[in-house]
Amino acid sequence: MSTMEYTVQQLAKLSGVSKRTLHYYDEIDLLKPKAIRSNGYRIYGSEEVTRLQQILFFKSFGLSLIEIQTIMAQDKVTIYQTLQSQQMKLIQQKISLEQQIQALAKYNKNTKEK
């Protein structure tokens, strides 16, 4: 074995995702194993590990699995545009949260002074 190969259990431990999640990603064609052994064990190689890292990266930005599937099927320009759009959504959420925090702080200050 010249390249690293991982079973579902090994990849789950390495990546911090559950075995069930890896099975689900396989079911929805988001992350397919590079091979399935005769005993039914799914085998993942370095390309699959890289793809899983990308999936987890995109998930960390709040993208849904459907959005991630769409992104990963696109070219780099489309990926860039999608991520730019997601960045703008997150900025808007941040602004909204900051406004809510300021409003609560003002309310708490006024309540405390009464």
Image (cartoon, grey):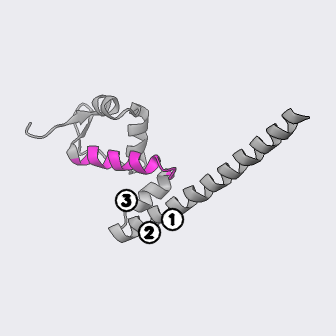
Q: Residue at x 50, y 53 (%)?
A: 63
Which three-letter amino acid code belongs to the residue tagged 3? Met
- Answer with mark 3 or mark 2, whichever residue precedes in sequence: 3
Q: Residue at x 79, y 44 (%)?
A: 106
Residues at marks 1 and 2 touching, judged by CB atoms closer than 8 Å: yes
Labelled disc at residue 43: none
Which one is in front, 91 or 25? 91
- Rendered view: 29 above or below 87: above
By secondary structure, the bulk of the magenta-drawn segment is best described as helix
Q: Is residue 73 visible?
A: yes
Labelled disc at residue 81: 2
* Residue 63 left/right relative to 43: right
Q: What number of labels is visible?
A: 3
Q: Where does residue 62 sit, x and y in percent of width and height?
A: 52, 50
* Residue 100 left/right relative to 58: right
Q: Where, quadrant-wise, is the N terminus in this rendering?
A: top left
Q: Secondary structure at mark 3?
A: helix
Q: Residue at x 51, y 65 (%)?
A: 85
Which one is in front, 36 or 92? 92
- Magenta stretch contains residue 78: no
Labelled disc at residue 72: 3
| Image quadrant where residue 68 sits | bottom left
Q: Where, quadrant-wise, is the C terminus in this rendering?
A: top right
> The magenta stretch spans which residues?
47-64
Badge 2: few (under 14), some or many (20 or more) residues near its Cα, within 10 Å? few
- Answer with mark 1 or mark 3, whichever residue precedes in sequence: 3
Q: Which residue is mark 1?
A: 85
Which three-letter amino acid code belongs to the residue tagged 1? Ser
Q: Where does residue 56 sit, x and y in percent of width and height?
A: 40, 45
The residue most toward the front is: 113
Q: Where does residue 32 sit, x and y in percent of width and height?
A: 32, 47
